């Protein structure tokens, strides 16, 4: 019995690692197919074949059919891996929390946001195009709505963090600050500036950091004081 108890944590960890690896394979295969063929022309059977898993495994990993599979692709692309680790617990976010200077916090946030946007841009574009072509596809429309709701919810974290430090402008409620962060970090803005306007990603990151600081921070912070 003692020997069995010793083995259980190892077995549990191994199962978790295997599940993560399977989710990663599925997401990678689905992402490549959806980007190359489009959302509508990508079938669950094709994804299963490319990932080297049974179709039933695909439905187990993403219950809800193809919209759920697309959400799995988006979530893993956003995070950068299949680890079941909340975004708030990741090292990049911890570095932002640990940074004492509010302007520098926003510079680190802009760097993180730029890296995320680089990853999710092709996936988000495919899903937007599919939704525009199939306005009656409720699952796809709900997926995009869920993504936007989650983005807005995620924007409340940095807004509340700055508010807790007393770093927000005195006239700016945290909810309104979150809405500004949500809009400024949209995939569409990233696409327009880097593709239509021809900005480099470094230029976008610098712009995002500066406009977030100008929009959110109180006038006593060095970033804004130096501009006066």
Image (cartoon, rainbow, N blue to C red):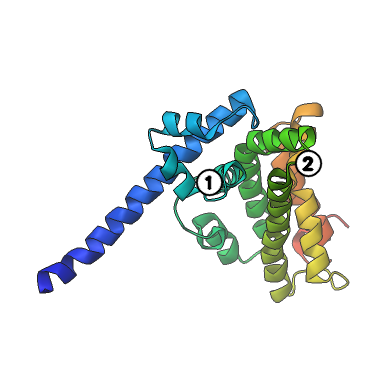
Provide residue 212's location: percent of width, then percent of height. 77, 54
Q: Position of residue 195 (x, y in %)?
A: 75, 28
Specify the quadrant that holds the N terminus: bottom left
Q: Which residue is drawn at 77% across and 44% down?
A: 207
Q: Are marks 2 and 1 in contact (CB under 8 Å)?
A: no
Judged left or right of residue 208, residue 68 is left
Position above or below: 55 against 90: above
Return the residue nearer the eye: 199 or 1: 1
Q: In this view, does 49 lie to the left or right of 18?
A: right
Dot 2 or dot 1, earlier in sequence = 1
Q: Is residue 224 visible?
A: no
Disc 2 on helix, strand or loop?
A: loop
Whole-percent x, y for residue 47 in the image: 49, 32
Q: Residue at x 48, y 58 (%)?
A: 85
Q: Where is residue 44 in the image (x, y as percent from the top left)?
A: 52, 35
Q: Which of 189 and 39 is in front in this view?
A: 39
What mark, if any, has residue 76 been given in the picture? 1
22 and 203: which one is in front?
22
- Residue 110 image label: none
Q: How far, Cα to Cα, is label 2 from label 1?
A: 26 Å
Above or below, 31 against 164 in this view is above
Image point (67%, 69%), residue name:
161
Query: In this rendering, which labeled residue sits more in front, label 2 or label 1?
Result: 2
Please say if 31 is above or below 157: above
Q: Which residue lies furthest to the top in this view?
A: 36
Side of 221 relative to 45 (left or right): right
Q: How crowded is mark 2: few (under 14 residues within 10 Å), some or many (20 or more)?
A: few
Q: Badge 1, how many Cα within 10 Å: few under 14, some, many 20+?
A: many
Question: What residue sits right under mark 2 in the picture?
Answer: 136
């Amino acid at each position: 019995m003692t020997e069995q108890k010793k083995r259980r944590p190892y077995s549990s960890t191994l199962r978790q690692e295997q599940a993560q690896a399977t989710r990663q394979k599925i997401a990678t295969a689905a992402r490549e197919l959806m980007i190359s063929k489009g959302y509508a022309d990508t079938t669950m059977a094709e994804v299963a074949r490319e990932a080297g898993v049974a179709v039933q495994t695909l439905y187990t990993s993403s219950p809800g059919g193809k919209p759920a599979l697309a959400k799995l692709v988006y979530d893993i692309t956003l995070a950068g891996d299949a680890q079941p680790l909340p975004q708030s617990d990741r090292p990049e976010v911890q570095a932002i929390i640990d940074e004492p200077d509010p302007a520098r916090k926003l510079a680190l946030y802009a760097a993180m946001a730029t890296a995320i946007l680089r990853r999710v841009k092709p996936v988000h574009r495919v899903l937007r195009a599919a939704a525009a072509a199939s306005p009656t596809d409720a699952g796809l429309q709900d997926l995009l709505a869920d993504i936007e709701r989650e983005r807005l919810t995620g924007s409340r974290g940095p807004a509340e963090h700055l508010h807790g430090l007393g770093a927000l402008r005195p006239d700016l409620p945290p909810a309104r600050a979150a809405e500004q962060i949500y809009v400024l970090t949209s995939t569409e803005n990233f696409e327009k500036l880097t593709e239509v306007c021809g900005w480099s990603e470094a230029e976008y990151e610098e712009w995002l950091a500066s406009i977030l600081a100008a929009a959110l921070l109180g006038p006593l912070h060095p970033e804004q004081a130096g501009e006066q």
